[in-house]
Amino acid sequence: MSTISTFSGFTMARLGIMASQKAMEVTGNNISNINTPGYTRQRLEQKALYVGGADRYASQFDVRVGSGALTTGVSQLRDPYLDIRYRNEVSNVHYYDGKLSVLEDLALIFDEVGKGTDDNGVIEAGLSDLLEQLQNMNTEHAGTAEFDSAVRESAKSLVEWFNEYAGQLDERLATTEKNLQEKVSRMNNILHGIRELNESIKKAEIANGAMTEDERRQGLIGERGSQALELRDERNKLIDELAELVDIDVKYSDEPIGSGMYVEKLTITLSGRTDAVLVDGVYGADVSFQKVPKTNANGDFLDENGNIVADAADAAYIDDPAYKLHLSALTDMRGEVIGPGRKGSTPVDLNEMDLTSGSIQALREMLTRNGEFSTQEEVNSDPRASTKRGIPYYQKALDALARQFAKVFNEANTFDPNNPDENWVYEQPVTDPPVVQDKYKDYVAQSGPLFSSEADGDNPDGITASNICISNKWAHREVSIIQTKKESEMKQLDPNDPNSQWGPLSSANSNVAHLITAMQTDYDYRADDLGDLVNGTLFKPGSYFKGSFHGMLTYINEVLAEDGKSTLEKLENYSAAAQDLAVSRDSVSGVDLNDEAMNLMQYQKSYSAACRLMTTLDELLDKLINGTGIAGR
């Protein structure tokens, strides 16, 4: 037969009441934090109580039952696999979102629709107006100062728009660089925050929940983390934000603290590079840009005053133009470096391919990638560099258009001594330097570059969209658009004076007609045409586009539109995946009011049942003690 222990039933009921009450407290805490950002749903952990040993009055016919329930701790409901997948997707989302943000800003700069007249953009309208003025000059006014002035004013307006576009690109480059610096600063703040939270969590675990090796093997929770769950929520929020900046790997492990006790340790590294440690327990890294010696265009080292020095050690050091990152050695809150020989004990310089996603990498690429203007060195660092187009690419594409435009007009308005069709104005045979024949001096004096890279000069070299301007001589009417470059269209201005100057026939306009044709001619745009703007050996120095000036402008906008479209499509795909994972993660870790209401009902009933059990046991014991031996009285 089975006997009833005098007080084991009361203990069982008491433990049931305590477990139900604690469970309702946890549920109440969940409900109160239902709108708290980053809060993770908590759950009471409990197990059946087992009491070993034999009873003094045990019977072989007795049946042993349990002794009640013990609460072993409070845990969080999280799925590490979902956390990993979510953070990977979020890193991709912010990578493409960062790129799209810059591309959209570039689109506002290059957006030709609605900025001009008749649905033409300002540069397109400027090219069309210049063509129209040349056609007016060609009709019957070739060589007339009035119409030369009209062409000059049209050209001036056009080059000012080139300057405006280039200036806006420079501003966007500076804004993006500042944004990147702010992202790196924010990354450091996050790493410091995670390091400090790790310190606080570790202290809480040591005070309340460090486990022995045996307890760890048994999978016990104990009080581990019960005093630090909210700190863990704050840490998880920071880890999620860190994943938006760079792609990371997160690992949890047990760290021995002596006397056979263990606490949890968090380690964060860059994805795919285990030696690039960002956080290791209470130690964290600082992130900065790598430093490189300052050099001039020829590669000479420069000191702080701009003087050439022989040794790189004597040069001034500046932030790496490629914005590659540097990780310091790991330090704790007191500035002490992690022990020697451990990962993170020495600084790490990141390579070009160490970052593959995240908003920091997106901004780096938009600040550095040159697309078809990439150098061999850039492709060696990033094999896909020639397919990635950042702000520098669009700057160079606009420079290429401005340079080709200026080159065509400057060559059309100067006499080339090496061209047999043009060197007739020079003494024959042509000498070096060439000498203009006396009879053509006045006419040749009217020729010269129409566009310059210097506002107060006539330098046709090194022209870009930012510096292109009307040449000084054309601006002061010392140079004009010449009517012809054909000897057959020349005449002696005073037939009665054999020494008089020669000039074009009144009907001569072949050079103006040539410029009109040139405005609509297709040209090869080659990457090596901008060799002076590229620091290194071009990866593909050949042609990347063939078309007219209008065609090149359209090409730039089409490339930008394609980049924006493909980036948007990828962003939408990754955003959808991240949203699905966020929903899945919230379904595990988020607080659901319906679930908590059901739990409240369940725990309320179990609490009432435990109380009823105690009452029943009390009645049984009372009957046993006070009623035994007096039956039938």
Image: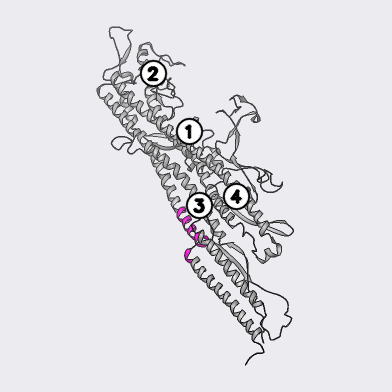
Residue type pointed to by label 3: Val
Residue drawn 30% across and 6% down?
A: 497
The image quadrant where one finds the N terminus is bottom right
Front disc: 3 or 4 = 4
Q: Residue 585, position in %: x, y?
A: 51, 59
Confirm whether the magenta stretch covers residue 575. yes
Give x and y (percent) for residue 6.
67, 79
Graded by Cα atoms within 10 Å as few (under 14), some (14 to 19) or many (20 or more), the crowding at tag 4 reads many
Seen from the viewer's position, the closer of residues 464 and 247 is 247
Q: Amino acid at mark 2?
A: Lys
Residue 321: numbered disc: none
The first of marks 1 and 4 along the sequence is 4
Type of the residue with mark 4: Ile
Real-space Cα separation, disc 1 to disc 3, in angstroms: 39 Å
Where are the magenta residues, as a range? 574-594
For marks 2 and 4, give the CA distance.
64 Å
What's the residue type where badge 1 is placed?
Answer: Asp
Kindly report the distance in space between the C-alpha atoms of the residues bearing marks 2 and 3: 58 Å
Real-space CA distance between mark 1 and mark 4, rounded to the nearest whole angstrom = 48 Å
Q: How many marks?
A: 4
Principal secondary structure, stretch drawn in magenta:
helix
| Quarter assignment of residue 492 | top left
Residue on which disc 3 sits: 90
Return the residue at label 4.
194
Q: Which residue is mark 2?
A: 473
Q: Give the vertical position of 533 relative to 75 (above or below).
A: above
Badge 1 marks a residue whose secondary structure is helix
**Residue 592: within the magenta?**
yes
